[in-house]
Image (spheres, rainbow, N blue to C red):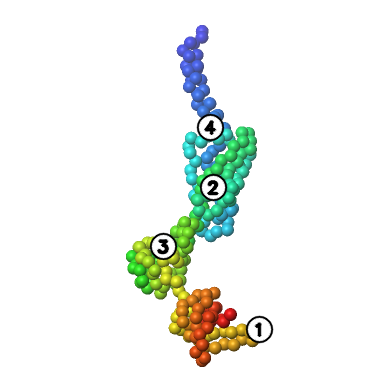
Amino acid sequence: MINLNAILNTLLAVSLLGPINLCQASGDTTQPHQAIIDAVEAYLQQTVAHSARNAVIKVTPLDHRLKLTRCDSPLETFSPPGGVKPGRTSVGVRCRSPAPWTLYVSANAGLEAPVVVATRDLARGQAITEGDLKLRTSDTTHLLRGHFESINEVVGRTLKRTLRRDQVLTPSVLVVRKTVKRGEQVTILAKAGVIEVRMRGKALKHGNPGELIPVINLKSKKKLQARVVAEGLVMVD
């Protein structure tokens, strides 16, 4: 005798399992987001991080609503127009089969390094001491005005403007250090072919290498225009 209750229960079980199996089958045909992210990270490690120390790669998570057909071959990664560079960037990811698609994924390839920052508020015109500074690891890709990686580079320098606590010290906030200072003695070098003549002089103006400044010959008292070569050395053109 046929058990109608058993048949109904079996049909009910099949109807409940059907959608679940279909969902699982559908999920199997969708490209995992993590595989795309892994491909982007690997590409940036080979391009940006390979040539830069302390590179930190962070890939922007993909929108959970994005559904792409699962690729049946290895994903292809490539640089977008303009190339891949440190900082905010993007990487192209391509699948060729069974259903071709191309996607651009945003990422940040940060270059971390120690940078010099102020330990407290510092006033304009203040001479910097070692206690005024500290090192902090930071992403340097956004420091477009430059930075210092050693405290010794700036100790003794003078501030051109106010510096706030924890602010990064950049070359633009420092008074330019002149190679030759006004009033100091210098060696004046004059050349004529293979002949060189050196004489003692005094700078009448501050100057850095390549700049023309007035100097005076201490023996003849004659004023000359000389080009700064190095610390304590100028040359008559």
Q: Secondary structure at mark 3?
A: loop
Residue 128, position as x, y percentages in the image: 38, 72
Q: Tell which tag, 3 or 4, sits nearer the viewer.
A: 3
Return the mark for residue 27.
4
Image height of 222 relative to 34, above or below: below
Residue 156 occupies which quadrant of the picture?
bottom left
The single residue placed furthest to the top in the displayed view is 1
Task: Give the alpha-carbon distance from disc 2 to disc 1, as whole Å.
Answer: 57 Å
Q: Is residue 204 visible?
A: yes
Residue found at the far right of this picture: 194
| Picture quadrant of residue 159 | bottom left
Q: Position of residue 233 (x, y in %)?
A: 53, 82
- Residue to which mark 2 is pinned: 90
Lateral position of residue 131 relative to residue 219, left or right? left
Q: Earlier in the sequence, mark 4 or mark 1?
A: 4
Q: Mark 1, residues whose alpha carbon is within 10 Å: few (<14), some, or many (≥20)?
A: few
Q: CA distance from mark 3 to mark 2?
A: 27 Å
User: Nearer the observer, disc 1 or disc 3?
Assistant: 1
The residues bearing labels 1 and 3 have C-alpha atoms spaced at a distance of 49 Å
Q: Nearer the viewer, residue 53 or 119?
A: 119
Q: Earlier in the sequence, mark 2 or mark 4?
A: 4
- Disc 1 target residue: 193
Q: Earlier in the sequence, mark 3 or mark 4?
A: 4
Judging by the rendered image, the residue that carries numbered circle 3 is 168
- Whichever of labels 1 and 3 marks the residue nearer the N terminus, that label is 3
- Please state which amino acid type lies under the numbered disc 3: Val
Q: Secondary structure at mark 2?
A: strand
Look at label 2 and name its amino acid: Ser
Q: Is residue 72 visible?
A: no
Q: Residues within 10 Å of mark 3 (few under 14, many from 20)?
A: many
